[in-house]
Amino acid sequence: MISIHRHSLTVRLTHWLNVICLTVLLLSGLQIFNAHPRLYWGKYGADADHAFLVIDSKPDGDALQGYLQIGRLRLVTTGVLGVSSEDGSAAARAFPTWLTLPSYRDLGTGRRWHFSFAWLLVVNGLIYLIHGFLRGHFRRDLLPSGEQLAPRHLWREVIDHARLRFSHGKEARRYNALQKLSYLVVVFGLLPMMILTGLTMSPGIDAALPFLPDLFGGRPSARSLHFITALLLVAFVLVHVLMVIASGLWNNLRSMITGRYSITDDGTEP
């Protein structure tokens, strides 16, 4: 059994701060979304305008029926989306109380939580980027090699992940191609998109940077992209956590706490 150094102190600290920031941003963002649970594309986004996604409720006899509508597809989601329990009775609410921050209806408090942790995420991200470029973290650890990008190699990794077969031998010492590509998409794609679309929804920022709304086709479009990007980040986190558990929970957690990752003498994971 040997122990290798996998994560620097800066990477570990920014990782765990990201966990806190993204959790608060998600929960407070759903509180904000509840104030107007509709998504539009274009420059107009009022109640009378066409929305491509709606979470709402309608009367169903003496009760309420919650639903999620995407285009022409409508799904009944009572108890999960549209209608949930609030103070012991059913209430019209896009996302339930246990998924919002604060749990009660308070748009102002939700916005304060959201904006505070959004700026913390930006500062934390800048620290990570500066460290990554100056210390060669992106080039050394996240940039896939030509061999890793070969279609046959990528397809084999997809199959191995689907079967929960993970790297061994010398391959266990580095990230695999799917890890590298997904991390690069998150760091240089999803997170910048979420930040830019979030800034676009601010009238004050738009006044200072008037090109932002046009960049995304209007503030309603920016809001929709912001929501979709958040969903993609949630999907990434869920898959990430699943892979961490399946490939060795304690070993992976220890590497992100102490920086050390254990493999057996032949290179396989313990």
Image (cartoon, rainbow, N blue to C red):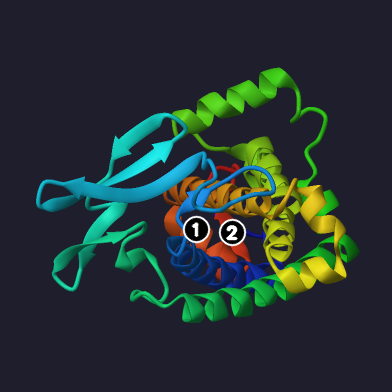
189 w.r.t. 32: above or below: above
Whether residue 21 sits left or right of residue 96 in the image: it is: right
Whether residue 210 sits left or right of residue 270 in the image: it is: right
Residue type indicated by callout 1? Asn
12 or 101, nearer to the observer: 101
Q: Please name the residue shown 69% across and 48% down the image.
A: 43
16 or 215, nearer to the observer: 215
Q: Are marks 1 and 2 in contact (CB under 8 Å)?
A: yes
Q: Which mark is residue 124?
A: none
Q: Position of residue 1 (x, y in %)?
A: 54, 54
Neighbours of disc 1 within 10 Å: few (<14), some (14-19), many (20+): some
Whether residue 4 sits left or right of residue 134 in the image: it is: left
3 w.r.t. 145: above or below: below
Task: List the single residue furthest toward the top.
Answer: 152
Q: Earlier in the sequence, mark 1 or mark 2?
A: 1
Q: Secondary structure at mark 1?
A: helix
- Residue 246 seen in this snapshot: no
Q: Please name the residue shown 64% across and 74% down the image.
A: 13
Q: Which residue is mark 2?
A: 261
Neighbours of disc 2 within 10 Å: few (<14), some (14-19), many (20+): many
- Residue 166 seen in this snapshot: yes
172 or 225, nearer to the observer: 225
Q: Which residue is mark 1?
A: 251
Q: Position of residue 165 (x, y in %)?
A: 48, 33
Task: List the single residue furthest toward the right.
Answer: 134
Q: Please name the residue shown 75% across and 48% down the image.
A: 216
Residue type indicated by callout 2? Tyr
**Residue at mark 1 to residue at mark 2: CA–CA distance:** 6 Å
Tally the marks.
2
Q: Quadrant of residue 164?
A: top left
